Image (tube, rainbow, N blue to C red):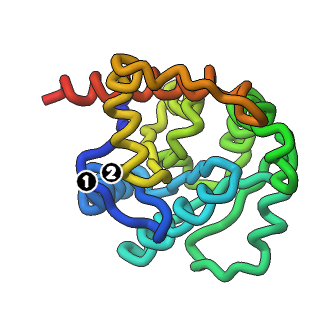
Amino acid sequence: MVFVHILAKIILTVSPLSSFYFSSSAFLLHQIRTIHQIMGCHVVAMPYPGRGHINPMMNLCNLLVSRKDNILISFVVTEEWLGFLSSETKPAQIRCATIPNVIPSEIGRGADFAGFVEATRTKLEDPFERLLDRLEPPRPSIIIYDISLPWVVGVGERWNIPVAALWTLPASVFSVYHHFELLLQNGHFPANVSGPFENCRFFFFFFFLNLRIKLKILDSVP
């Protein structure tokens, strides 16, 4: 399969508080045009279902349809998030597609943040895959996913659909992740964390490690 995993050489601002990584918007549009010429263009956007992630993905989708009017985007959200977005205006080429509320509510998720993170990593994949099977034609051409949902890569491989990763955090955070080994070398990690984030430290460690592996692979690609 043609596997597109675009992570990072140029940062393009999506919102004042976040950035996303693609090799360039022009490159992504070129990929979409190529796919469209072959099979028609249907983009599936899978944002991380939390504040600070939905808007950057929507901003990217708005950017794409503003540049090319024959792109169709299925914007995947939970039923709860559909209610939050129902009053927002969006271009006709962007349609919302819903999956059940299989994760804790956005309201009050901070009470068990570790449980929320775990749910996004373990409970979304199955309903997302079932959604792909019932989307209206044309068949999805590419999946753009929030990098915090790494299971989307496996879905893309099973469905033979190219995927592209969206980085929604500030560029400074990406720099920290990219140089994470310095935190280890200088004894700054693991950190002495207490309170509601105490159970999250091992999740963040493995997230950082996974990201570093991906970056090393990308650095080795000509």
Residue 206 shows up from this direction = no
Q: Residues within 10 Å of mark 1 (few under 14, many from 20)?
A: few
Q: Position of residue 78 (x, y in %)?
A: 78, 52
Q: Position of residue 90 (x, y in %)?
A: 62, 78
**In front of the other: 217 or 155:** 217
Residue 181 shows up from this direction = yes
Residue at the extreme left of the image, as rendered: 222
Which quadrant would the N terminus be assigned to in this image? top left
- Labels 1 and 2: the sequence-earlier one: 1
Residue at 34%, 17% in the rendered image: 185
Residue at 54%, 48% in the rendered image: 140
Q: Which residue is mark 1?
A: 10
Residue at 73%, 25% in the rendered image: 199
Vertically, is 184 above or below 4? above
**In front of the other: 70 or 24:** 24
**In front of the other: 36 or 203:** 203
Q: Secondary structure at mark 1?
A: strand
- Relative placement, left or right, of 70 versus 28 is right
Front tag of 1 and 2? 1
Vertically, is 9 above or below 3? below
Q: Which mark is residue 22?
A: 2
- Relative placement, left or right, of 159 versus 181 is right
Residue at 61%, 54% in the rendered image: 137
Which quadrant would the C terminus be assigned to in this image? top left
**In front of the other: 159 or 8:** 8
Q: Position of residue 89 (x, y in %)?
A: 66, 82
**Contact (Cβ within 8 Å) of mark 1 with mark 2:** yes
